[in-house]
Amino acid sequence: MDSMITAAAYALAAGDPLGALNRIALRDDAPALALRGIAMAQLGDLVRARELVRRAARRFGPAEAVSQARCVVAEGEIALAARELRWPAASLEAARRTLAAHGDTMNAAHARLLAVRRWLLIGRLDEAERDLALLDPAAVPAASRVALQLVHAGIHVRRLRAAAAHAALAQARSAALQSGIPALLAEVERATALISAPAARLTSQGTQRLLPLDEVEALQRSKSLVVDAFRYLVRDQAAAVTLVRRPVLFALVRELAQAWPGDASREALCSTVFGASAADASHRARLRVEMGRLRRLLRAVAGISATERGFQLVPRRARTVAVLERPIAADHAEILAVLADGEAWSSSGLAQALDSSQRTVQRALEALAAGGAVQSVGSGRTRRWMAASFPGFTTSLLLPSSILTD
């Protein structure tokens, strides 16, 4: 490798893409194309970056398997930055195996870290932790150690491990300072600010207050009956009942919990849950049926008593009832939560991250854009969405219950 290529590579490692381009911008050989692609990615031109990396892979050819595999890893990182989460993970794994077989442990570790980050973005925490356990932290490139610790922090936040999350962020900050790259330090500072913000809203006995992450974690271990609107769970210390696939039943139990220790009227339940402006006989009949289903599902943690005007929640063991909800009541808050990472997302990437249909996500984005909450750049397949401003709450906890698994 000649001196200009080496100097450009060092510039990229130091976070200086313009310095790298000054050395190789006019060159068209395979190593220069690869480095130009990485430089363009650092500058934010991800479309051009992908094109250059793919050209480099073709120029290297099958005889240079290691160089081709490095280009695949670079393309995977560009896809991750562009939030193109449907990019084939199998290609990244094949490249990782090639690099490992040829002794390039650093780039092989980087490839595995990219796979872990993708698992985290689409909410597959079990898979993320599985692959993270196979990763040797010592083999991770110095600049990537920040991303590694941010992954740890992201997993801990979603698992409600506040102390571990803050410890991971402290290590990420230390790694960012050692790297000397301002962009990495800014990323860590933003993540720290988000995790330190209010994480949830607690409603109990008619009062509401915002909770930081550590208090949300403590609530899960308390003796309260917790109606968890993040995970669609109803739990006490001894048992938990999931209502992820029963949104109507969860809406009913949330209304009952908010009214506890009193009861919720039939009219209020029909209006809030069924959307009835005036409850008639059919609504009341449906309410009786749904309450019967809810009683059967909740029997391990609570009973439901009929009262003169409605229904009352009766905990089996808990002394208090608490409702845990999003810290804000905005529509489509889960989309704002994803966009709050500061990256530009495609609607398909958002759909995969939220385990939803792309059309549903597109309608939500259009509604948010009309209200000025999000903005788009580009058009057609290159259209990307960003939050107009960053909300002041712990956004990871706003993701859907299917993502926030225990």
Image: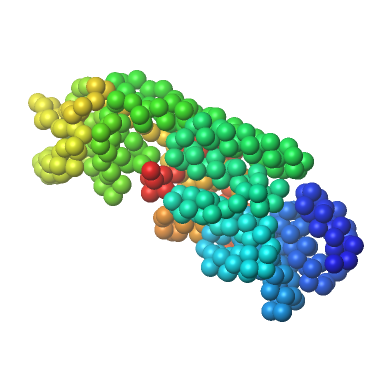
Q: Judge whether 35 appears above or below 353 on screen.
A: below
Looking at the picture, how far across and down is residue 196, in whole percent? Answer: 55, 29
**Which quadrant of the rendered structure holds the N terminus?**
bottom right
Looking at the picture, how far across and down is residue 45, in whole percent? Answer: 71, 58
Give residue 194's quadrant in the image.
Answer: top right
Residue 49 in view of the camera: yes
**Which quadrant of the rendered structure holds the C terminus?**
top left
Give residue 118's quadrant in the image.
Answer: bottom right
Going 65% across and 49% down the picture, which residue do you hit? 138
Give the camera-side residue of 244 and 249. 244
Going 52% across and 51% down the picture, which residue do you hit? 133
Direction from residue 273 to residue 365 in the image, left or right: right
Going 28% across and 35% down the picture, which residue do you hit? 235
Q: How many marks?
A: 0
Give the camera-side residue of 387 and 257. 257
Direction from residue 202 to residue 199 in the image, left or right: right
- Here the colouring is rainbow
Looking at the picture, how far across and down is residue 90, in whole percent? Answer: 53, 68
Residue 364 in view of the camera: no
Going 63% across and 37% down the picture, which residue do you hit? 171
Q: Judge whether 21 appears above or below 152 on screen.
A: below
Q: Judge whether 55 appears above or below 175 on screen.
A: below
Give residue 374's quadrant in the image.
Answer: top right
Looking at the picture, how far across and down is residue 198, in whole percent? Answer: 49, 29
